[in-house]
Image (cartoon, rainbow, N blue to C red):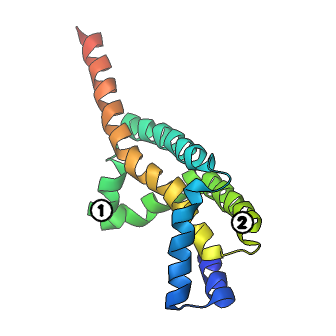
Amino acid sequence: MIAFVVLGVVMHGLSVPVFERMWQNLLDRPSGPMTFRFVLQPLMASIAALVDGVKDARTGRNPYLWTLLKDPRKRSSRLHEGLISTARVILLGLSMDLIYQVIVFDTFHPAEAVIIAGMLAFVPYLLLRGPVTRVARWWLDRGSADETR
């Protein structure tokens, strides 16, 4: 993803008109072709968050975002773990944005593809994994309390 950002800077430069074009392009995407990806990618990221959140609850790990924000020793490994879990969704997002840009713009803006893929794939994962962990932990604790009765 860093390579895409660097490639975008090399191809299109950094200037106020470039940033204006980029933000306008980002805002126009949901109303353009291939809008299904605005449902598909967050849905896939949510499924990954569900699976990983339940694993966290079963192993007694702290919620994901809380750990990223509050525990600098574990931040790098947990961030890496999240990126690995969402890697396929991010790659799918980059591919779909490439196709979108070729159809709509007849060119490729790599930095925009990175922003869209991150927003649609990693942000939902980041926001959902912790609450899923908490709900799953509550559910598992509830089940174990019922077994002891």
Residue at x-position 62% and y-position 68%:
113
* Image quadrant in which you'd find residue 69: bottom left
Task: Identify the mark nearer the N-term, 1 or 2.
Answer: 1
Residue at x-position 59% and y-position 77%:
2
- Report the quarter where the C terminus lies: top left
Residue 37 x, y percent position in the rendering? 62, 49
Foreground residue among 97 and 89 = 97
* Image quadrant in which you'd find residue 79: bottom left
Residue 82 x, y percent position in the rendering? 49, 55
Q: Which numbered marker is on residue 69?
A: 1
Residue that carries the numbered disc 2 in the rendered image: 104
Given the image, on which type of amino acid does mark 2 rest? Val
Q: Residues within 10 Å of mark 2 (few under 14, many from 20)?
A: some
Q: Residues within 10 Å of mark 1 (few under 14, many from 20)?
A: few
Residue at x-position 51% and y-position 82%:
19
Q: Tag 2's secondary structure?
A: helix
Tag in front: 1 or 2: 2
Residue 133 is left or right of residue 142, and the answer is: right
Residue 34 x, y percent position in the rendering? 67, 51
Can residue 115 be seen by looking at this rendering? no
Residue 74 x, y percent position in the rendering? 37, 62
Foreground residue among 29 and 113 = 29
Can residue 148 be seen by looking at this rendering? yes
